[in-house]
Amino acid sequence: MTGNIKKIFFVIIFIIITLLISLIINFVTSDFNIELSDNVNVALIKINGPIMYGENGGIFSGDQRDAAAISKEINSASEDESIDVILLDINSPGGTVVASKEISNAVKRSDKLVISLIKEVGASGAYWIASQSDYIIADSMSITGSIGVIASYLEFGGLLDEYGISYEKMIGGKYKDMGSPFRNLTLEERNLFQSKIDQIHEEFKFAVMKNRNLTQEEIDELGQGQFFLGIEAKENKLIDELGDKYLFEELLKKKYNVTEIKYTQFEKEMTLIDAFFGKVESSFYNVGQGIADSFKTEQRLKIK
């Protein structure tokens, strides 16, 4: 009887160990272990220019796109049953913290296969976004990485003193005019600013470390704000493969036996009316922003 109990005990232990090993293997490989049909529909989502909130200024402006719109496109593609894969077409130097984080959160939430394709540049906030995808492809000469945060402000208090102009302030709260261009930061204020920057930097590093399976030592070395060429990024495990859109398609064909690839672009097409009124709206906004920038004292944190 005692012998049978021992056998049952060892069988139970063996089953538990087997289940644990299976769970661990499934957890490690689940991010890229997705089945696809022969014909796949790829959602093509472009992330171009500085990452921030605000609409494109029209046909005469640059390629900057609204971060909220990009996030919405990723969410829509994730919920669309006709979409099999999401391709993030990235050519961006980064941008503001919250805008970059909103898009990266949308990528992280998606249950679809998300692949990032970095062209000329996918650095800073743009790399934060790419790092949350399942697979990263970049050109060997592209610029990526730049895992860091920067905040800056103008200070011309000395210039005012030179011309005998005084800065009189009336504030509610001792830190309310912290970062004002009309006076120097105190040591206490500088330390306070630095603590906020360090906090954002650590969250950026942690997000990259977790999804790229890096050690703390590796991310501490790679996360000092330096940029990497694509070939260096691959050596440091920041990307998965060197290549372009052709390689992306070859990846789908070889790994998933895909025979036909269809692209669906989620970006809203701009009509002539949208372009005209977008340009007019942008012009008035820029005039107002230029006036406001002369007086504002708040900083905008950027991931660089």
Image: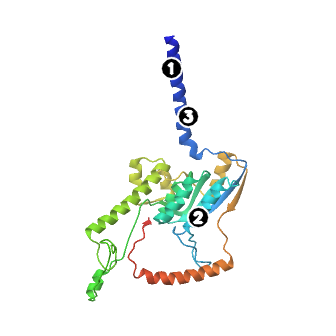
Q: Secondary structure at mark 3?
A: helix
Residue depicted at x 50% and y 50%: 211
Mark 1 or 2 closer to N-term? 1
Q: Secondary structure at mark 2?
A: helix
- Residue at 56% x, 39% y is 26
Across and down, in percent, residue 71 comes to 57, 62
Which residue is depicted at the point 42% across and 46% down? 215
Identity of the residue drawn at 30% across and 67% down: 190
Q: Nearer the viewer, mark 1 or mark 2?
A: 1
The residue carrying mark 1 is 9
Q: Where, by quadrant of the figure, is residue 164 drawn? A: bottom left
- Amino acid type at image mark 3: Ser
CA gap, disc 1 to disc 2?
55 Å
Q: Can residue 224 be seen here?
A: no
Q: Quadrant of the C terminus?
A: bottom left
User: Residue 224: which disc?
Assistant: none
**Nearer-the-camera pick, 288 or 262:** 288
Q: What is the spatial separation of the Cα atoms under label 3 and label 1, in whole angstroms? A: 20 Å
Q: Residues within 10 Å of mark 1 (few under 14, many from 20)?
A: few
On residue 22, which mark appears?
3
Horizontal arrangement in the rendering, residue 2 relative to residue 41 (left or right): left
Q: Tag 1's secondary structure?
A: helix
Q: Amino acid at mark 1?
A: Phe
Task: Point out the tag, 2 or 3, that comes first from the N-terminus.
Answer: 3
Q: Which residue is mark 2?
A: 70
State the image coordinates of residue 12 (x, y, percent, origin top left): 53, 23
Query: Can you say whether 256 is above or below 17 in the image?
Result: below
Graded by Cα atoms within 10 Å as few (under 14), some (14 to 19) or many (20 or more), the crowding at tag 3 reads few
Disc 2 residue type?
Ile
Identify the mark nearer the N-term, 3 or 1.
1
